[in-house]
Amino acid sequence: MRVVVQRAKNAKVIVEDETVGQIDFGLMLLVGVTHSDTKEDAVFVADKVANLRIFEDESGKMNLSLLDVGGAILSVSQFTLYGDCRKGRRPNFMEAARPEHALEIYQIFNEELRRKGIKVETGKFGAMMDVQFTNDGPVTLIVESKEKGE
């Protein structure tokens, strides 16, 4: 799994002129799934995202997690995170999981975040989406699932 984590002051996703997911404060996530990702990968990445200390404490240091500050998550599926741009001019998406598998892992990931008590809003899997958000900081990180065999 590959997740782009962006600290957000607000975020929303619109599908066909309708807002389908919206948060006021927390994390904007772009979530990519590859063929070999498993439930264990989804659980690992969800735990990492929920506990990343990327929010400021009273001293202005990034010492607090989303769980500490009570923020929400807007999670948007993003197969293009597995686009390979090394050759030619058109990205190759061979590493992106097939939609059936990607949806299963994406849903497990979101449910694991909810299980931690986090409010999770989502886009619409497989749809063309307009994503709007205000990046706070800006703070943007990439979280990937652990190496197989660790």
Image (cartoon, grey):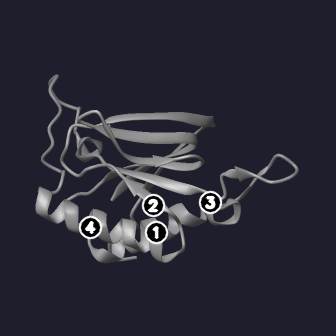
User: Closest to the observer: 87 or 122?
Assistant: 122
Identity of the residue furthest to the top in this view: 89
Residue designated by label 2? 120
User: Horizontal and vertical percent for residue 88?
Assistant: 14, 24
* Kind of residue at disc 1: Leu
Residue designated by label 3? 66
Residue designated by label 4? 105
Which mark is first along the chain, 4 or 3? 3
Between the residue at mark 2 and the residue at mark 3, the CA separation in whole angstroms equals 12 Å
Marks 1 and 4: CB-CB under 8 Å?
no
Image quarter of the N terminus: bottom left
Dot 4: element: helix
Name the disc covering residue 113, or none: 1
* Kind of residue at disc 3: Leu
Marks 4 and 2: CB-CB under 8 Å?
no
User: Closest to the observer: 109 or 150?
Assistant: 109
Whether residue 109 is visible, yes or no, is yes
* Kind of residue at disc 4: Ile
How packed is label 3: few (under 14 Cα within 10 Å), some, or many (20 or more)? many
Between the residue at mark 4 and the residue at mark 2, the CA separation in whole angstroms equals 15 Å
User: Closest to the observer: 92 or 79?
Assistant: 79
Whether residue 147 is visible, yes or no, is no
Marks 1 and 2: CB-CB under 8 Å?
yes
